[in-house]
């Protein structure tokens, strides 16, 4: 929220990671952003920074930065004065978070000389530290929820699945999702039978002829689901086929795949920091970003210290498809690109190296790596909470 009606100008003095600068902009949105960049990092920093900044709604970004020598303090001071001088009457804030030492000192000199604010964004601890002018209250905690975050990029969210509408209690749904996460191949087989045979609308009874014979282990999974109340009247014929009833469309959607989103959502909520406080200040599941083209789905999104984890959940029998990676990448490109951490979660286990499927799976992992997406397979689901905690603090693919 803006402090007054003056134009808010953020001057980024850059030489290292862009992520903390973006976090400061999202947490305290300015009207205008200008950049001062050391010439030895110009090629690496400028393009991704401009692409991300220009995606932020209502933000005016100056395309041409002031380029400086990281070891020339006189030129660095001149650049700071020059950029600030282009905005008479504005409220100026220098952000020297990633600045090399000498340009950082230069920004401090000019901030103190002209009574401007100078900040450092501590992305690890979610704080904006005011270095100048000297005040008693120097730290501002960063707490942004998902709605606020996507609004910075001119986006909004719509919920697509509400677990409150299931025909069972949330406790029962949670227990079922946890059971399915540990069921592995038997659970995948059982759920695939339900996904294929259970298609329809509203309440429906699935006859024996629409299913196929199930293994004993998959039948055990179906029996557990029936005990929860998500399917009713489960019966098995002599040839191994099953019949059952689905009470509500929401129940089918849950069994079709939303159970994995719900499980991931619950795992994220269990994550705690070193002080036993919830790690994520906001966790959402089953939302979409409306767009001019296809609607962009977000299965699970977690916010921690102003930073976003985007999680795609695929519970089908054939999850290792490039299009799913591209969908996740397309969503992240709408809300910060490489500033967000991307995770692909599936209930299917990774195939054995000697299996016929391993070659395609290995190719999928390479494609995920190219897109900076961390992959979590079925055998790792019981560790998902720990994986999310690790990715929040120390992501596999660094937030740029």
Image: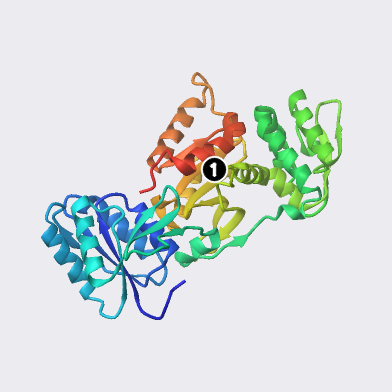
The residue under the point 44% across, 74% down is 2
Image-based side of 384 in relation to 359, left or right: right
* As drawn, 250 above or below 380: below
User: Of residues 122 and 217, which is closer to you in this image?
Assistant: 122
In the rendered image, residue 298, in percent from the top left (x then y), is placed at 55, 53
**Is residue 206 shown to the viewer in this render?**
no
**Is residue 337 shown to the viewer in this render?**
yes
User: Of residues 111 and 390, which is closer to you in this image?
Assistant: 111
Quadrant hosting residue 36: bottom left
Quickly name the residue at label 1.
Answer: 273
Image-based side of 128 in relation to 270, left or right: left
The residue under the point 17% across, 50% down is 40
Please rate how many residues cluster around mark 1, counting C-alpha atoms within 10 Å: few if below 14, some from 14 to 19, many from 20.
Answer: few
Image-based side of 131 in relation to 165, left or right: left
Name the element at disc 1: loop
User: Of residues 134 and 139, which is closer to you in this image?
Assistant: 134
Image-based side of 214 in relation to 302, left or right: right
Quadrant hosting residue 5: bottom left
In the rendered image, residue 355, in percent from the top left (x then y), is placed at 52, 21
In the rendered image, residue 116, in percent from the top left (x then y), is placed at 29, 70
């Amino acid at each position: 929220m803006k402090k007054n009606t003056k134009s808010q100008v953020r001057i980024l003095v850059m030489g290292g990671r862009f992520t903390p600068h973006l976090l400061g902009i999202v947490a305290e949105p300015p009207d205008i952003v200008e950049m001062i960049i050391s010439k030895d990092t110009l090629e690496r920093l400028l393009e991704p920074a401009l692409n991300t900044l220009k995606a932020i709604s209502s933000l005016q970004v100056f395309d041409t930065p002031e380029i400086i020598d990281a070891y020339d303090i006189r030129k660095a001071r001149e650049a700071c004065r020059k950029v600030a001088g282009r905005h008479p009457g504005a409220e100026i804030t220098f952000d020297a978070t990633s600045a090399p030492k000498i340009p950082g000192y230069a920004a401090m000199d000019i901030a103190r000389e002209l009574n401007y604010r100078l900040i450092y964004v501590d992305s690890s601890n979610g704080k904006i530290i005011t270095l100048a002018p000297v005040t008693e209250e120097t730290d501002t905690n960063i707490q942004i929820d998902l709605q606020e975050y996507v609004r910075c990029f001119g986006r909004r969210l719509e919920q697509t699945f509400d677990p409150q509408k299931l025909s069972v209690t949330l406790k029962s749904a949670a227990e079922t999702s946890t059971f399915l996460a540990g069921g592995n191949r038997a659970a995948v087989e059982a759920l695939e039978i339900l996904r294929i045979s259970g298609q329809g609308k509203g309440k429906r009874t699935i006859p024996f002829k629409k299913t196929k014979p199930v293994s004993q282990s998959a039948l055990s999974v179906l029996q557990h689901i029936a005990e929860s109340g998500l399917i009713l009247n489960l019966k098995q014929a002599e040839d191994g086929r099953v019949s059952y009833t689905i009470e509500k469309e929401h129940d089918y959607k849950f069994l079709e795949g939303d159970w994995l989103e719900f499980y991931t959502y619950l795992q994220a909520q269990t994550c705690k920091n070193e002080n036993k406080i919830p790690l994520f200040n906001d966790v959402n599941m089953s939302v979409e970003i409306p767009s001019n083209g296809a609607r962009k789905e977000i299965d699970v999104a977690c916010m921690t210290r102003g930073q976003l984890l985007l999680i795609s959940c695929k519970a089908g029998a054939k999850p290792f498809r490039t299009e799913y990676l591209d969908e996740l990448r397309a969503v992240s490109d709408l809300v910060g690109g490489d500033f967000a951490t991307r995770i692909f979660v599936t209930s299917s286990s990774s195939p054995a190296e000697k299996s016929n499927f391993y070659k395609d799976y290995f190719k999928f992992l390479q494609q995920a790596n190219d897109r900076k997406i961390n992959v979590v397979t079925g055998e790792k689901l019981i560790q998902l909470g720990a994986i999310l905690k690790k990715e929040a603090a120390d992501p596999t693919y660094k937030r740029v």
